[in-house]
Image (cartoon, rainbow, N blue to C red):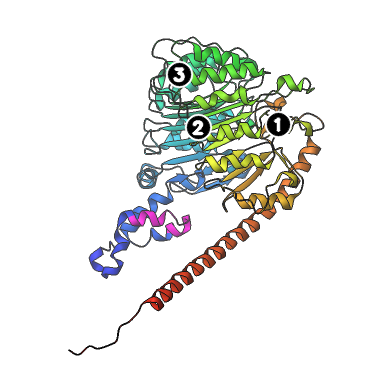
Amino acid sequence: MRSITSTDCPSAHRVLFISELLDIIFNFLDRDSNVRNACVCKRWSNIALDIVWKEVDDLLHLFRLLKPIRPQEDAFEYVFETLPEASDWSKFEKYASRVRSFKFRPENYELEIWPLLDDVARTRTSLEILPNMHTLEWIYTTPAHMERCKLFLHRRLRHLSVTTPSQLLHPRPDFYTDLCARAPHLRTLALFVTYPGKPIDAELRILLQNLPELEKITLPEFHYTSAVIEELSRAKNISVVDFSQDLKLGYGNPTNVASFAPVLTDGAFPCLRELNLSARIDDLDRFFHSSFAPIHLTTLYVNSYTDHTPTEVHTFLNTLSQQCQLLSKLNLQLYYKDLPFDNLAGERLSYDTIKPILTFPNLSSFEIVHKYPLRITLDELEDMASKWPNLESLMLNAEPLFLDEDAFTLDLRALLPFAKHCPRLRLLGLYINATEAEIPSSYAPLESFGALQTFSVGTSQVRDTSAVATFLSRICPSRCSLEMGITWTEFGCQDNRVLPNGLQSPLQKRCLAWRAVEGLLPALIQLRREEKERSRALQEEVEDLRVRNRLLMDKGDTKTNDSCIIA
C-alpha cells in the first residue's frame, strides 16, 4: 500500500491528512465504510482499522484473522481448519492490539464456541490475547463459557462485567481469586451472579480486598448486606455503589437485607459519592446517624419494600438534611404495596412529611414513590417551588396505586408554580386530576417552562383530552414529552413486580387517555409557536410603522426659512 503524503495533494485536500479530523469523520461511518477507508493509504489505514476493531462482539470474526473457521456439524461446535501457528499469531497482533472493548454473548453463536477458545489458549504465543483491551463484558450460560472468560483477563483491563442469566450457574470459588490475580487494576466491576437463598459475602470480600483500585461496583439488588457494606467502607477508592434491577441479571434474596446494621470504623468510605441501597428506612436512619457514616454523598437511591409510617419517612429525610449537606440527588422509593388499602388518612405522606427536602442546600433532584397519593395543596406547591429555584428534576409520587378519585388534591394548575419559579426544571412528575373545569382561561397570561423535557403523569387522570392538550401546549416547550404508566413492576424480586388485582384495567384506561393527549400535544405546540412568531412579526411591523409615522410627523413640524435678506 502506497503512503500518500499531504504534499502530494492540492492544498484543499490536505485537510484529509489531519489525523484528528479523520478520526472524528471515520467515527461517524459504519464498519463497511471504514474497511474501505483502510484500503486507501497507510495513513487512513491505521485510523480506520483502529475504529473497525475498537469494539468487538463476534469471536468468530476476530479469530478468522488467525485461520479459517468452520462448523463441525457432528460435534455441534466451531473449529479451526488448521491450528494457528506462531506466524499467524504474529500477523494477528496487528489487529488484536487495536481492540479496546469486547462483549461475549452466547446467543450470537449457533454452535459451541468453547472448543475454539481451547485451541486459542493452547496455541497463543502470549498470555495477553487482546493486550490493550480495557473493557470486557462476559455473559455465560454454561460452566464452560465461564471458565473461558479467564483467557481475556489481563493487567490492563479496567472495566469488567460478568453475568449469568441462570440461578443454577455461578462461578467456581477460584474464579474470584483468579480474577484478582489476572486483572488487579480494575476500576469498575459489575457482577450479576445469583446465589439463591444466601448472600455472597465471602466471595465479595475476596474481590474488595484484592482490587485496591476499584472505583465502582454494581451488583444485583439485595446483595448489599451489612457485611458487604462494612467491607466496602474499607475500600480506599470506591466512589459509586450501584445495583441493577434487571431480573435477567439476578436480584438476590430480600431476606439478606431484612436487617441492615453495618458497623463502620474511622475512615470509612473516604471517596464514596453515590450510594444505592435496598433497606428499611428506620435502619438507614440509624446508619446515617452512626459514627463514620458516609456524609459526603452527592447521590442517594433508596428502595424499601417494607411499610413505613409518615413519621419514619419525615425522620429519615430530616436526618439526611442534617447529615448529608452535599446531597444533590435523592430518590426515595417505597415499594410496599400489600392490600387492602385501608386507613388512608393515617398512611398518606403529606407536604409536612417531605418538607425537610427544602433544607438541603444543594439538592436539585428529588423523587419519592408511595402507594398512596401525596397529600399536598396548590398553596403548598407554590411554597415549595418558590423556595427551590435550582430544582432540575422532581418526581412527586406521580404513580400511586390507590386510584380512588377522592384522593386527588391537585389539578393542572399544579404545574404553574414550577413554570414560574424553577427555570432549570427538566423533569417533572405529578399526580393530578386533569379536568377542563380547572384549566385557566385562554386569555389569562401564563408562565411557560423554559427547560422542561419530560412531564410524567404516572397514574394521573385526564377527562377532556383536547382541552388538557391545549393547556399543556401553552406552557410546555416543543421538545417536552409526556410519560405515563407505572414503574412498580420494574423493581424488587419477582413477587414484588406483580400488581394487585383490579388495577390493570383502570390503569390501562388512564394511560390510553393520556396517549390521546400525547398525540395532540406536538401539533398544538407547533401551532402555538407559529402563532407567537406571527404575533411577534406583527408587533415588529406595527413598531416599524410607529417609528416611520413619528419621523414623518417630526419632519412636518419642522419650519423651514427660505427668505433672503439683502442689507
Examine the rendered structure and indicate whether residue 56 appears above or below residue 366. below
Residue highlighted by disc 3: 294
Residue 557 percent coordinates (x, y): 39, 76
Q: How crowded is the residue under tag 2: few (<14 C-alpha within 10 Å), some, or many (20+)?
A: some
Disc 2 to disc 3: CB gap under 8 Å:
no
Per the model, the C-alpha gap separating discs 2 and 1 is 35 Å
Task: Give the quarter of the image for residue 29.
Answer: bottom left
Q: Residue at label 2? A: 161
Residue at x-position 57% and y-position 40%: 418
| First in residue order: circle 2 vs circle 3 | 2
N-term-proximal mark, 2 vs 1: 2
Q: Which residue occupies the foreground of this view, 213 or 68? A: 213
* Extent of the magenta region: 21-35
Q: Quadrant of the N terminus?
A: bottom left
Mark 3 lies on a secondary structure that is loop
- The residue that mark 1 highlights is 400
Q: Quadrant of the C terminus?
A: bottom left
Most prominent secondary structure in the magenta stretch?
A: helix
From the top left corner, tell me how far across and down residue 193 is, in percent: 57, 25
Amino acid type at mark 3 = Pro
Is there any visible trace of residue 327 in the rendered image?
yes
